[in-house]
Image: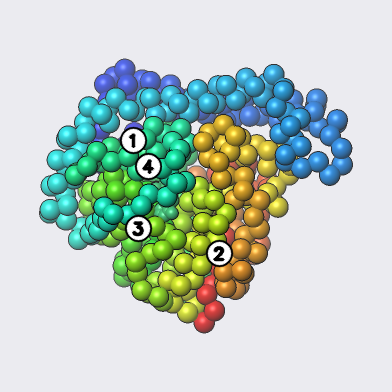
Amino acid sequence: MTRHVHHGLRLFPTRDEAAAQDFVSSLRNHVLNRMAASMRARFEAGVAPSLGEGADSRDVFEAMRPHPYFRFYTAVRVKAQEMVWASVRASVERERERLAGLFTELSAARPAGGSLTLDPALPIPENVAAIDVHLMPGSYHTDGGDGDLGAGALYENGLSVFSFGLMGETLDDIGRSIALWLSRRFPDLAPRAILDVGCAVGHQTLPWARAFPEAEVTGLDVSAPCLRYAHARAEALGVRAHFLQADARSVPLPDASQDLVFSSMFLHELPVADIRAVLREAWRLLKPDGLMLHYELPPNAVLSPYDGFYLDWDSHYNAEPFYQGYRDLVPLDEASAAGFERFFEAAIPSLGWYGEAAVGAAALTEGAAGSDRLGRLADGVTWYVWGGWKPA
Ligand SMILES: C[S@@+](CC[C@H](N)C(=O)[O-])C[C@H]1O[C@@H](n2cnc3c(N)ncnc32)[C@H](O)[C@@H]1O
């Protein structure tokens, strides 16, 4: 079922709209669980035996492409994705002015003491502007002008429907789980400045401010409407955080100003050259002995050919053209090339699903990433992270 947004920026869908949202959530749950399991069984019984030794995820894709069940799965999943946005769009449009009013009030009062800095001259990069990323109408950046929160509201309400409860009450399970894991894994860590790049509406930004109340926490993104929403949302939730409109490849903050540079679900939306620029920029921004940490899709290198094929679906059908290229990279090599050392990766159990004890236990366990333990492929919910330290 949809976990509807319930903080100060909540929308008020009609009963028909709420019913449509619940239906779409259930449909996505069905496609990603029951249909995905059926497709895998069909692959194993009917397609795998004809693949030669050494077949990779691209070979699996070519073999599965004409398969009637894959085509059925794809048709339903694309339709479900379009319906995610369609199910929330009318209420976002209807409530645009009310949201703009809330933004004006909250950004004037700033009850949590956060801030918003926009740069109207910032060029929007092509990876955002040239496509409707994951079929979201208008992508992240389309801006109706002063006080417009539309793209942010569309993203947050759509994500609530899309994730059918997997991401926690306030869609922040990733950030909460990772912040807890990090504080258990590295108990001496006491970051004073934390930067979340590609923060969208700040879902995974605020858990850092809650976990490390002494730190100045900044969320950075290119999208003004997402950042306005992020700022108003943080203030409505009573969490102090700063939001900055900037490009993660070239951030207007001083060298060696951050203790932790984090991202979540961000790198896979960038072309490889931009990913490398972001990693170099993280290195510049970090203090010596600072930590870079990314929550991401698992790389191809740790996946079976079928699992790689399964994740590549979004590259082909969901307007996520950089998914596959990102997952072809080897995080250790990329981190090393950007100057980081003491690389690590981990599969972190979801706090919401497994509780604090499980996250704490995982923090004390070496090693990470068998494909059976990762993210959407796991039997349950885990978050794959990788990171490295700037030399002291
Ligand atoms: C999938 S969203 C990230 C969601 C968020 N981090 C979370 O976990 O909830 C990707 C975000 O990256 C932003 N983005 C894309 N390219 C960027 C760039 N070069 N610099 C900064 N932000 C960028 C988009 O505007 C979008 O908000």
The CA span between labels 3 and 1 is 21 Å
Image mark for residue 154: 1
**Residue type for callout 2:** Gly
The CA span between labels 1 and 2 is 31 Å
Q: Residue at x 32, y 28 (%)?
A: 89
**Residue type for callout 4:** Tyr
Which numbered disc, 4 or 1, marks the residue that appears first in the sequence? 4
The CA span between labels 2 and 3 is 22 Å
Report whether the residue tagged 4 is closer than 8 Å to ligand 1: yes
The CA span between labels 4 and 2 is 26 Å
Q: How many marks are shown on the rendered structure?
A: 4
**Residue type for callout 3:** Ala
Which percent across, then down, holds residue 388?
56, 68
Report whether the residue tagged 3 is closer than 8 Å to ligand 1: yes
Q: Is label 2 in a helix, a strand or a loop?
A: strand
Report whether the residue tagged 2 is closer than 8 Å to ligand 1: no
User: Circle 3 sits on which residue?
Assistant: 246
Quick check: 31 left or right of 212?
A: right
Nearer to me, 283 or 291: 283
User: Circle 2 sits on which residue?
Assistant: 387
Q: Is label 1 in a helix, a strand or a loop?
A: helix
User: Circle 4 sits on which residue?
Assistant: 140
Quick check: 181 left or right of 115?
A: right
Q: Residue at x 36, y 52 (%)?
A: 123
Residue 248: image quadrant is bottom left
Marks 1 and 4: in contact by CB < 8 Å? no
Which percent across, then down, holds residue 97?
17, 34
The CA span between labels 4 and 1 is 9 Å
Which percent across, then down, holds residue 204?
40, 52
